[in-house]
């Protein structure tokens, strides 16, 4: 801790930073010439910090590997997941809202390539924003509007416009496995069933909404069926009695869903995140795949370049099968959570190692591509349903950074849950504790939301945004550089991957990625000790450092074909 304190104190003097940079409890322009432009960008990037041996001095060393941005306008994106309720409150009612998201867009991406004041994410996934009876809003009462807590359709239209000005694609959660029990369709259906005389069967011409849900008298005591009002009928609700399941085999229901999707596409959204896709017909994979194929085909017929990603909380074999639907993306659950490949490798749990990390990744990519050769992987570490990375790594900042670096050098479109870039903490299994207010500042509380009802008090071990912005060694600045490197090198997301087995060891992972004839090599030192890697052993010559990530500010260097890597570091070579 004394070393970190001296480091930051010296750094403040050298770079004239504002006060308040010290971490708390780290455990728990077109007219410029090319040379001038490059210098300007270097000046804007957070410097590296090199520790002296006597533990009393710190030397600020510039990061010398800033490249021009090379962002391709396609569906490979760096996504930032936002729970609007807890993100930023623009009107003082304690609840986050659409205008709050708009006010923070420049934090996510300001759309100005000449500056480096944003995180660099160019995709946003909004959790549900449609009217609902709950704080999480996964039970929709109106598919054609914005929940009044969040704002209006006009606010949403402005959000879409402001996102597009900044080059951000916006996708929204689309929940059609079920509706709210307060949805007009369900209310009318139950009212009609209650009106039937004993022995009288429902007439779908009189009330078509009865056919929109799974109503039955013969529910065989299933715990996922509930009594429909005062009638003799029961309805299916796999998640909750307030979330009646839709009958997705009903053509009228499908037409309703198509109309809803077109409505939001016409408003300008770039695509959808599909909730609970494996529960459309629980335990019936083939029927679920058919639903995804139908929806994907329809959306593509309306907007050819629309992007769709679905939640299929399954193992790799099932995910590979779901790709046969033709859907562009499925969340890569085998990589996520405390027991997933990413955190497992960073924490060195089980059989995880540098070599197995690379080979497992390649195996996953090959399996998924057999289902859909044009698939775009959707890797993530955590989301609104899982424990945060801070809990997964027990607040070990080095492991948290390394996990983030591994995620942000993977193929596809990575997803980062709001607050992960500052190490926000969650606690236990309660969902509300995973969806706490975004920690913008301790001293300036304007816009900070009230926790969801039933949330516990969760101690935040890491500083808020405004403090981490000032600290070159913060999680925030690690994420910022990782996303920047990704935006400089399109090969990272899109390249055909192969494992460089000659360089892989228990601690070293080495991969090559090739995109449109351009090759990069990525080396990972997944260890708490430094490592030297000789590229000659793999016949690799004429490579140079293009960018790197390190958890403690120490530099990755290369001399005579040997790459010297600090602990928990990642380097891109080209």
Image (cartoon, helix red, strand yellow):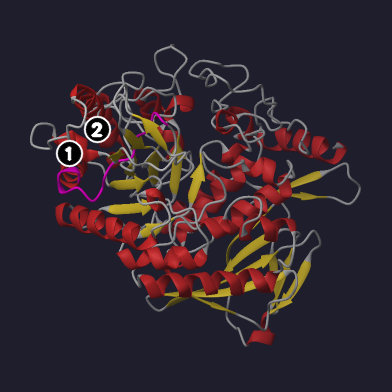
Residue range in magenta is 241-253
Element under disc 2 = loop
Reply above or below: 350 against 78: below
Q: Work out whether residue 39 can be spotted.
A: no
Label 1 belongs to which residue?
Answer: 263
- Give the Cα separation between the discs numbered 2 and 1: 9 Å
Q: Is residue 243 magenta?
A: yes
Q: Residue furthest left?
A: 205
Which quadrant of the structure image shows residue 543?
bottom right
Q: Which residue is nearer to you in this view: 158 or 44?
A: 158
Residue 542 place in picture, x, y as percent: 57, 81
Reply above or below: 13 against 567: above
Which quadrant of the structure image shows residue 570?
bottom right
Label 2 belongs to which residue?
Answer: 143
100 with respect to 380 (left or right): left
Q: Look at 25% across and 28% down and name the residue there.
A: 142
Element under disc 1 = helix
Residue 571 place in picture, x, y as percent: 62, 64
Q: Are marks 2 and 1 in contact (CB under 8 Å)?
A: yes
Q: Look at 39% across and 28% down and name the residue there.
A: 242
Q: Residue furthest top?
A: 92
Is the magenta region chiefly helix, strand or loop?
loop
């Amino acid at each position: 801790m004394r070393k970190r304190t001296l480091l930051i104190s010296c750094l403040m003097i050298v770079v004239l930073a504002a006060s308040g940079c010290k971490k708390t409890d780290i455990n728990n322009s077109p007219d410029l010439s090319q040379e001038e432009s490059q210098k300007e960008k270097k000046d804007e990037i957070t410097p590296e910090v090199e520790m002296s041996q006597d533990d009393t001095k710190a030397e600020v060393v510039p990061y010398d590997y800033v490249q021009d941005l090379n962002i391709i306008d396609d569906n490979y994106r760096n996504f930032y997941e936002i729970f609007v309720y807890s993100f930023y409150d623009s009107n003082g009612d304690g609840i986050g809202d659409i205008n709050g998201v708009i006010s923070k867009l420049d934090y996510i991406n300001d759309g100005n390539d000449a500056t480096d004041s944003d995180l660099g994410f160019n995709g946003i996934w909004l959790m549900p924003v449609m009217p609902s009876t709950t704080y999480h809003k996964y039970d929709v009462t109106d598919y054609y509007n914005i929940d009044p807590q969040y704002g209006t359709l006009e606010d949403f239209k402005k959000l879409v416009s402001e996102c597009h000005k900044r080059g951000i694609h916006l996708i929204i959660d689309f929940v059609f496995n079920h509706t709210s029990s307060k949805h007009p369709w369900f209310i009318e259906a139950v009212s009609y069933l209650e009106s039937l005389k004993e022995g009288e069967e429902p007439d779908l011409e009189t009330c078509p909404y009865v056919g929109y849900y799974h109503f039955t008298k013969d529910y065989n005591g299933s715990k996922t069926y509930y009594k429909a009002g005062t009638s003799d009928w029961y309805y299916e609700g796999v998640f909750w009695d307030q979330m009646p399941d839709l009958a997705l085999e009903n053509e009228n229901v499908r037409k309703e869903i198509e109309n809803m999707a077109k409505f939001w596409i016409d408003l300008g959204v770039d695509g959808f995140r599909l909730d609970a896709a494996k529960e459309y017909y629980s335990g019936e994979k083939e029927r679920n795949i058919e639903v995804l194929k139908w929806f994907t085909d329809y959306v593509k017929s309306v907007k050819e370049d629309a992007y769709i990603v679905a939640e299929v909380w399954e193992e790799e074999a099932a995910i590979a099968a779901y790709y046969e639907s033709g859907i562009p993306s499925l969340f890569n659950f085998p990589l996520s959570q405390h027991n997933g490949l990413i955190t497992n490798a960073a924490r060195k749990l089980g059989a995880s190692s540098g070599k197995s990390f690379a080979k497992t990744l390649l195996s996953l990519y090959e399996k998924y591509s057999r289902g859909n050769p044009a698939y775009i992987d959707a890797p993530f570490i955590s989301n609104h349903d899982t424990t945060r990375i801070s809990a997964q790594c027990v607040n070990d900042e080095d492991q948290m950074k390394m996990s983030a670096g591994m995620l942000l050098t993977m193929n596809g479109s990575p997803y980062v849950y709001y607050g992960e870039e500052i190490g926000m903490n969650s606690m236990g299994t309660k969902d509300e504790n995973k969806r706490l207010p975004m920690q913008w500042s301790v001293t300036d509380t304007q816009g900070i939301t009230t926790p969801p009802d039933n949330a516990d008090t969760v101690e935040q071990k890491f500083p808020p945004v405004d403090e981490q912005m000032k600290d070159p060694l913060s999680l925030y600045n690690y994420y910022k550089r990782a996303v920047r490197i990704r935006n400089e090198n399109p090969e990272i997301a899109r390249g055909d991957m192969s494992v460089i087995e000659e360089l892989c060891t228990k601690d070293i992972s080495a991969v090559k990625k090739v995109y449109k004839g351009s090759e990069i090599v990525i080396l990972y030192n997944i260890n708490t000790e430094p490592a030297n890697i000789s590229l000659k052993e793999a016949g690799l010559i004429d490579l140079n450092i293009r960018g790197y990530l390190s958890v403690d500010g120490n530099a990755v260097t290369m001399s005579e074909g040997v790459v010297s890597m600090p602990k928990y570091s990642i380097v891109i070579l080209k």
